[in-house]
Image (tube, rainbow, N blue to C red):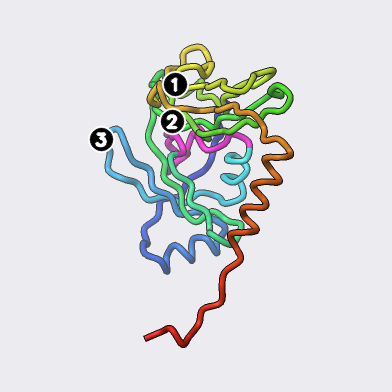
Amino acid sequence: MAEARIDADVRTEFGKGAARRTRRAGRIPAVLYGHGTDPQHLSLPSLEFARVVREQGRNAVLTLSIAGKPQLALTKTVVTHPIRPYIEHVDLVVISRGEKVAVEVQIVITGEAAVDTLVNQELNTIEVEADVSNIPEQIEVSVEGLTPGTLIHASDVPLPEGTTLRTDADILVVNVVAAPTAAQVEASMDLEGAGVVEEPSDSSDED
């Protein structure tokens, strides 16, 4: 994973009003913590940090310049506005080179299963432990040619070298099932249609 360098300013004002002023200035409120250090309240350049997240994903590794001193950090939480397209807040964790960290990594399904099958992805992310310099951006799971009844559990997911699984090995990740026949689909639609027909209530029977 590539490492980005970002200038971080120390924040001295706190609260919702201060956070809004920080965002209006084109920066994102952030907190850096971990390794037994006191939390540091920072602000990051909005456009630059958003670009890093787009390129690296949820587990972006940063070298922060704080008052001229470098600090390696891992992006832990990115809070986005529920409606507007901007980042509201970021949590960062202090890390060291050579350290292994636990991270959630996106699972991406690749390939085409056998004809007349449906592929159900039961798990979107998987927790792994990896070196901070080699965190996978995503993990691919191939369903090429798989037949109905095939189950892929977390223990079956291929991991990059040096990466170990932390998610429960027995958790189901992918379930390949037979696609319903045309007759089954039609019968299901008939049942759903029948279910929406209700007898009108007779108010004379009410107490």
Q: Quadrant of residue 25?
A: bottom right
**Image position, residue 93 (x, y; %):** 38, 37
Residue 6 lies, with reference to residue 83, above or below; the image says above
Residue span colored magenta = 55-75
Image side of residue 89 versus residue 195, left or right: left
Q: Quadrant of residue 108?
A: top right
Q: Which residue is mark 2?
A: 103
Q: Which residue is mark 3?
A: 36
**Three-letter amino acid code of the residue under disc 2:** Val
Q: Secondary structure at mark 1?
A: strand
Of the 4 image quadrants, the one containing the N terminus is top right
- Between 140 and 5, the residue placed more toward the observer is 140
**Three-letter amino acid code of the residue under disc 1:** Ala
Question: In the rendering, which numbered label is found on residue 130?
Answer: 1
- Between 85 and 21, the residue placed more toward the observer is 85
Q: Secondary structure at mark 3?
A: loop
Q: Earlier in the sequence, mark 1 or mark 3?
A: 3
Question: In the rendering, which numbered label is found on residue 167?
Answer: none
**Mark 1 closeness class: few <14, some 14–19, many ≥20 residues within 10 Å:** many
Check if residue 107 falls in the magenta segment: no
Q: Which residue sits at x=60%, y=63%?
A: 196
